[in-house]
Image (spheres, rainbow, N blue to C red):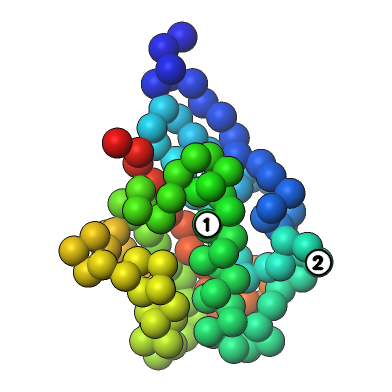
Amino acid sequence: MASGDIRRAIHSDRFPKPVASYSQGFQKGNTLFITGQLPVDPETNLKVGDGDITIESQQVMRNMQAVLEEAGFAFKDVVSATVYLTDINKLDTFDVVWQEYFPDPQAYPSRAVVEVAALVLGIQLEISAIAIKD
């Protein structure tokens, strides 16, 4: 099997335990599919933020970073993301945190932002992403 054909599920103690049956990420060749990341602390496996979208956003981005690093990727490799918010009016606040991880406007990944009625665990934010290594 050629190296580009290898499929591997990404698992690590550096991110929260899944709340259902899925992998935190899945790599095939030079592409990484990152499961929707939640604002859950990997040490306690409890949600964080208590309604504070900034704290939730920071935790989600740290969890995404853990998946990226476990697979040998970085934020610069993220090419697409889907952001789920329970209140679209919090997009500007979330975007401040997003820009800490993606500071170069010329290198922003493509992104869709969707307002949803509810998310698991009563959280306000979830992000899934795709990363490709050159």
| Viewer-side label of 1, 2 | 1
Identify the amino acid type marked 2: Thr
Indicate the quadrant containing the C terminus: top left, top right, bottom left or bottom right: top left
Residue under circle 1? 65
Percent coordinates x, y for residue 7 in the rendering: 51, 26
Q: Is residue 53 above or below residue 126?
A: below
Percent coordinates x, y for residue 85 in the rendering: 47, 77
Percent coordinates x, y for residue 94 in the rendering: 44, 81
The residue positioned 69% from the left and 53% from the top of the image is: 14
Identify the amino acid type marked 1: Gln
The quarter of the displayed image where residue 25 is located: top right
* Circle 2 residues within 10 Å: few <14, some 14–19, many ≥20: few
Task: Say if residue 112 shows up in the picture.
Answer: no
10 displayed left or right of 74: right
The quarter of the displayed image where residue 29 is located: top left
Whether label 1 touches label 2, CB < 8 Å: no
Q: Is residue 102 above or below residue 50?
A: above
Q: Which one is earlier in the sequence, the residue at label 1 or at label 2?
A: 2
The residue positioned 52% from the left and 66% from the top of the image is: 61
Q: How many marks?
A: 2
| Marker disc for residue 122 | none
The residue positioned 48% from the left and 63% from the top of the image is: 127
Q: Is residue 14 above or below residue 93?
A: above
40 displayed left or right of 62: right
Residue lying furthest right? 44
Task: Say if residue 24 shows up in the picture.
Answer: yes
Q: CA distance from mark 1 to mark 2?
A: 18 Å
Q: Is residue 84 above or below residue 78?
A: below
| Marker disc for residue 44 | 2
The residue positioned 46% from the left and 70% from the top of the image is: 84
